[in-house]
Each structure stands twice: as structure tokens, then as C-alpha cells.
Amino acid sequence: MKYPTDHLRTRLACGTRLPAALLGLGLLGGCASFSPDGGLDKVSAITRERMAVAPAPLRTDQDAARVREEVKRLLAGPLDAESAVKIAVLNNRGLQADLAGLGIAEADVVQAGRLRNPTFTFARTSGGGEREYERAFLFDLMGLLTLSTRSDIEGRRFEVIQMRVANATLDLAQNTRQAFFSAVAAQEAAKYQEEAWIAAQAGAELARRMADVGNFSRLRQQREQLFHAESTAELARIRQHAARERERLTRLLGLSGKDRHFTLPERLPDLPAAPLSEKDLVQQAMDSRLDLSMARTEIEGLAKSLGLTRATRFVNVLEASYLNNDATGEPQKRGYEIEVSLPLFDWGQARAAKAEALYTQAMHRVAEMAVNAESEVRDAYGAYRTAHDLARHYQDEIVPLRKRIAEENLLRYNGMLIGVWDLLADARQQVAGVNAAIQARKDFWLAESNLQMALNGSGAASVGMITMSAPASAEAGGGH
Amino acid sequence: MDRRQFLSNAGAAVLGAGLVSKAGAASLPEAPILTDPATQPPLHPMDGRPYNPVVTLNGWTLPWRMKDGVKEFHLVAEPVVRELAPGMKAHLWGYNGSSPGPTIECVEGDRVRIFVTNRLPEHTSIHWHGVLLPNGMDGVGGLTQPQIKPGKTFVYEFEMTKSGTFMYHPHADEMVQMAMGMMGMLIVHPRDPEFMRVDRDFVFLLNAFDIEPGAATPKINTMLDFNLWCWNSRVFPAIDPLVVRQHDRVRVRAGNLTMTNHPLHVHGVDFEVTCTDGGWVKESARWPEVTTDVAVGQMRAIEFDARLAGDWAFHCHKSHHTMNAMGHDVPTMIGVDHRGVVEKIQRLTPDYMVMGERGMADMGEMEMPIPDNTLPMMTGWGQYGPIEMGGMFTVVKVREDQKPGDYSDPGWYPHPQGTVSWEWTGEPMAAERREGPAADAQTLKAVKPAGHHH
Ligand SMILES: [Cu+2]
């Protein structure tokens, strides 16, 4: 027998006196209230622990004006990764929607802490010349019985949602950093491609003049012309790529109109003096990964529920676990249902066993999560370290070598050992080398950002923003 | 004692005698070493039959010792470092510290015993190019003797039955060892010192290397596209001048161990070829020339009277052979307008400068940085400006007041007043620079191969 809370009504016999005890309970039930920060302080705290910025909700015109002002200030000079993240966290409307979701969740918490108002109904029916008056006083007895459990669960649920919003913020920050590095790299690559294109143009023009005075055959000239033509096509592609990367960043920054004319730095930031050491990274992840924190919070709740079920054997709040790790790709349904059964036929042994099994299952899931997180950190560190070493190799070895080769080639040109065409061909290769170095440095910054996510967030493979859909299986805290 | 200091620049002549007494008791003659590339004074014979010694251009003569009436020489085949010209050193293989090896001089009728020690990483042998001798002394590895293994010493002993100009070089892994610079001159003087006596007798080998600009070791697999054309492993401006006294009778002997012929051309004289591979040319068979082609593997001696004083060019007439390292794939830039293009190229190559737009003479004047250990393609300055030459080029300096036996460089020739070409300062012809022709469709279609008309 199930009695979903929102349907459960206890019909009390019509009576004129409301028992004082019930009244007292009613007052008690009304103690849950909205927090002054709307749950944001916790989100801010979690976020600030992991990066320099925290989200702030846009509720009023003043908020909007303040954000506009701050964004304007940040856009004044060339962006860097940190200012890009700041702008995104302040200005991204998707994140604002997530923050608003926090309000919804808090409302649920508050609601869960309150008893449904008692209802008085009066009915008069008449028929067959007879009149009947019915008076009823309805009181949410079930709500009263489950009040503390519900508050508890909603409180924890809210805590998890706070962590989710914090995680969404970290996700946004990561996406923004990655988009920023990609946009800068693409812009830098486009600039170098332009140099190569100019050299190809010079080559084509010189070849034309060579052919005009009879020093080049048409074949030789057309080869240079073809090179220039292909270089033009390549430049168009690379420029489009740069524009696309920039738009991706623009979207994450939530910018439109004039604001989209922001300035990117000329080049990617330098590599750090030394790469992070792998030592302690796993422990750091265990301590600060949000997905693990969430799972821990949830499993604490589960443990409490288990205790409750053991004690009473008649209350079950475990059915809808948060730790539903189903990988079906369907939206997760989260929520809970409280059911109170009357111990007439079933003394609850099976229920208690099931509760234990669910708890055990959840424990294993969390353990699995921890194992995965640990591996993810190692994986992300491996990628980070390789990307770092590669970028440094390009920076310290390949690019200087290319440069020295270019210098040597110029010496050979000076000595009339090679011609200007060899010089141009080499210059183009040099551009390709610089571009490869830019890509390597970009890869490093992307890997660095992934590593941060693996350490602090919910893993490198974390999917973008979470959706704050209302819990589906139950509407907590009683109906309407 | 450092054997590399054994022979000083000035002391070569004396050393011949010194060596005999020092190493007289040893079974193996001393092997003197010389690494200095300067022309050494002639080595006058201290014992044995008398002769008029030669002067080896940028080289020296190997001292000998007499033992039981036999002239004993000692050649050591070994890796050497040879300065091709200041600014470029080559890692070569040679003999007794230098490439080419020292000149061996002896006299018709001499019995010679030549010890050859191999300090190369591979086996070798020596062939006495042009000398008539017993077959087993011909030095063809595998054919007439086993090769000389590294660390071993072989002895060649034979009698010089005929005078003339000869060479020596390995006949074991010959392609590699000659490409690495192993060669030397062998002069057999006539028994009668008065026979065809000359006042100055110069000798050198024509040799060529392919050394990548910026490198030092020859590319041994190159067949024809050499980039350093040398006389005695030297290139202009580092080939010493042939200094003579006016009216001297001069002989110049050259042997060709490159893989192409060299038309040797002397300015200011007409000469006759007086000795070839086979021996002395009868007077009735000679004809006057100003250029003589020395084919591959040949020896030629030319003789002339230095009638006219001055600084006379002496060079191979293949114009690429009077250049140092150059790129043979460099397109011709003459007449190509570079306006507007240079700046674009400079965006990628900031130090780029236009060259060749007017020709290549810029190369002789501009002193632009070029790769390490690489010589400018055309170089060397005379009293009137850049000489714009490299490779097989030098100067015969004929001077009235040059002392007999004095080979020191007298400097540039002081031309008597009015004997140097001068600038016309009268009514000028309109002499603006003319543009080159543009190639129109007609230019490029003008010559069609026969048989392809339809
Ligand atoms: Cu030549």
C-alpha cells in the first residue's frame, strides 16, 4: 500500500476542537524558512575553493547594472583566461538559469519543512427534500509524521543541488578556458598563415616577373602561382576556423552586440616554469572532487534512511536513490517517495534487507566512482604531462631549430648557394613549425584545464551544464 | 719532440740533411710532417746526383736519406686538416700532414726506396703514375700487390729510368681516397742538370672536392658536381702567386687528378708544352699556345719566357672552375624587378636582400655573412677592386727586380704611367642602363624542335 505524500490525506472526524497538541506541532512544522543567501553562499564557497571567482545571481536591475559594469571593465583590455572565466561566470545566462534552479530547490526545502495547512471543508447537499450538512476538518497527519524525514532529505538534496550548481560553474569555467585557449591559438595560427600566404604571394609575383623576362618557364611560374592559390584557400579555412572558435567563446561569455568585439591576446600564455608534480594529486582529487562530495552527501542520507528503516521497518525512503548510476542515457530521475505501511501482515524483514542491499549497492557505486576518479586523475595528468613536455619540446627545441635553419638558409642565400625560392620554401616550413608549436601549447592549456577538472570538478569528461529539472518521481513536501 | 713542428716554414731545405744524421741508424727513414699550406722554398739536393729543384705551389718537397746508394723516402698516409683558403679548413686524407702529399724529387738513374706507412682507417696502396717500373711495384692493390693494411708499412723499390713529370696516388679504394685528397707529384730530373734547364720550375696538382657549405669533409660520392676546384688543395685567393723575374725561363708542371679536363690559360705569355705524360716533347713537335687542356689523369709541363712584366692571370678557363662553392640550381634573377616583393619576403626573412638582379658581381663586393667554413663564391681583391674569382685562379707575377731564387710575393704590379686602361672623359654616349627585353609569345615559341610540326 502506497501513500504518496502529496496524495495522502488524513481525514479527521469532524470535530470542533483542534487538539492543542496538533496545533503545537503545526507551529513546529513551520520553522523551515528561506535562507538569506538562497543557498548561494555554499555554492560560492565551493567555487571559490577551486577558482578565483564565484557566481552571483542576477535578480534585480542593480545586479544587472553591476554585472554590466564589471564585464565592461574586464573587456577594456585584451582578455586573459582568468578574465574570460570571470565574465562567463558573471554573464552566462545558462549559469544564471542554474542559479535560479537553486531557488527552486530551496523552495522545495522550505516547503518540505512545512506542514500543509489544515483544511476545513463544509458541504451542503440537498436532494429529495433533504438537506445535509457535512463539515470536515482535514489535517495533514502523514505530513506531520514524515516531517523530519522529509526535511532531512530535502536538506541533503539541496546540498547536492548546491554542489551541482557549483559544478556547473566549474564546468562553465573549464569550457570557457578551453574556448579561450582555442580561440587565441586559432587567431595566432591565422596570423602565421597570413605570413605564409604573403610569402607565397611574393613568390607568385616574383615568378610572374621571372617568366615575363624569360627567366622562368611557364611550368615553373605556374607552380608558384598554384602554391599561392592553394595558400589562399588554406588561409580562408584557417580564418574561418578562428572565427568559429571566437564565436564559441563569445557564446560562453554571454556576449552580444558591441561587446562581442573583445580583444584576444596576441599569443597563448607562456608555459608554467615547471609542470605540476603528480605527487599528491590523487589525494587532492579525493578531497576536492565535487562528484565524490556529492556521492558522499547522498550516501550519508542513505545511511540515515537505512537506520530509519531498520528502526521502524515501516518507512522506506530508499526507493529513489540519488545514486542512480544508470547509464541508459535517459535523464536521471531524482527524488524520493516516503511510504508508511501499516504492520499488519508484513513485519518488514524484507524491506530492511532491501534497504541494506540498496545501501550496499550505493557504497559500491561510490567506491567505483572513487576508483574511476583516481584513474581519471592519472589519465588527465598523463595527458597534461605529455602535452607539457611536447609544448616545451616545440618551444625549446623545434622552433629554435627551425629558426636556426632559417638563419643558415639565409647564409646560404647570401653565398648564392641557394635561391630566393628555397628561402621562401623554407620560410613556409618555418611557419608550419611555428603553427605546430602553437597547437602544442594550446594542447597543453587544454590538458591543464582538463586536469583541473579531474582534480576539482566531476572529471575531465564531465558533460557541460546540468539541467535543473524538477524531481520527477515525487513532488516533495506535500501537494497543493 | 713534436714531429709536426719538425719542419718549420723556413727550414725545409736544411732538414733534408738533418734527417739523415738523426735517423741514419734507424731501419726506417724519418717521415717528416708539414701542415703549413704556404709554398716552401725549393729543396736543394745535399747529396746524390745534382739537379735543379722544383717549387711546389702551396706545398713542399719530401726530404730523403741516402742509404747504400739508394734514396730512401718515407710517406705516411693519414688523415689531415688542410686549409683550402683562410676561412675554410677541410678534413682530408693525405701524406705526411698535408694534402696533396709532399713532392718527391729524384734524378734519372736514381734507385729509390719508398716506405709507405698506412695510418688510415682502411687499407691503401701507392701507384706511381707514369713511371716505368717492375710490375710488382706498380701499386695496384689486388693486382700487383696485397693492399697495405692499416698500421702496416710497405716498401716500394725501383730505379728511375726516365726523367719527366709524374704523380703518385692510391690504387686501393681509389675513388674514395682520391676524393679525400690523396695524391702527390713525383718529379724525375734529367741526369744532366743542364738539359732543358729553366730558371723557375713550378709544380702543382689539379684536384677538386665537393664539400657541403658549412661542412668540412668531402662528399666522396660526387662524380662531377664538385664545388671546390683546387690547385694543390688550395683555392683562390689562397693559391700562392707564381713569382718570377722578368726574362726568366719558367716551367709550370701540372697533373690532373680531378674527374674533368682543365684548359689552363696564362695571360701575358705564349708558351709551349714541353713535357707530357710520356716524356719530353721534341722541339720540332711543340706549338705555341696560350691555353692548354690538361685532360683527366694527364701531366703537362709548359714553358715560357717571362718577357712582359706585370700581374698576369693564370687560371682554368672553365668559368665555373674559377668560382668557389656556388648553388647550381639558383635561378637567374637578372632583369627581374623586385619592387614590392622584397618587403613581403622580409616579413618572414627580415635580413633578406635582393641579389643577382643585376648579375652576380655583387657577390664579389658584398661582404654578407655566409655559412661557417665556407668561402665566398667569388672573392679576392686586387689593387683596382674585387677580382671576382675563386677556385683555379692565381697570378703570375713577373717583376724586373725580382732576385734570382726569390719567391716572395712582390705585391701588386706598379703599372707605368699611362699603361692602364682609363675612363673616357670626352663626349659621352647616352649610357643609361637598358632594360632587358620582355619575353613575348614570340620569344618563347621562336625555336621549335625540328620534326614536331604537324
Ligand atoms: Cu677547370
Image: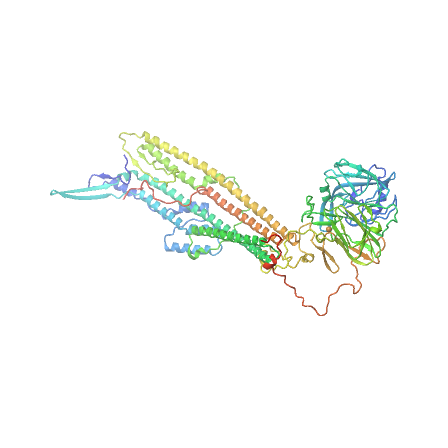
Residue B274 versus residue A14: which sits nearer the camera? B274
Residue B194, position as x, y percentages in the image = 88, 49
Whether residue B2 is visible to the viewer of this picture, yes or no, is no
Residue A386, position as x, y percentages in the image = 53, 42
**Numbered disc total:** 0
Residue B233, position as x, y percentages in the image = 74, 48
Q: Is residue A436 left or right of residue A328?
A: right
Q: Is residue A31 left or right of residue B158?
A: left
Q: Residue furthest left?
A: A129
Quarter containing the N terminus of chain A:
top left
Whether residue A456 is visible to the viewer of this picture, yes or no, is yes
Could you say which quadrant of the image residue B249 lies in? bottom right
* Color encoding of the figure: rainbow
Quarter containing the C terminus of chain A:
top left
Residue A122 versus residue B6: which sits nearer the camera? B6
Residue A261, position as x, y percentages in the image = 46, 56
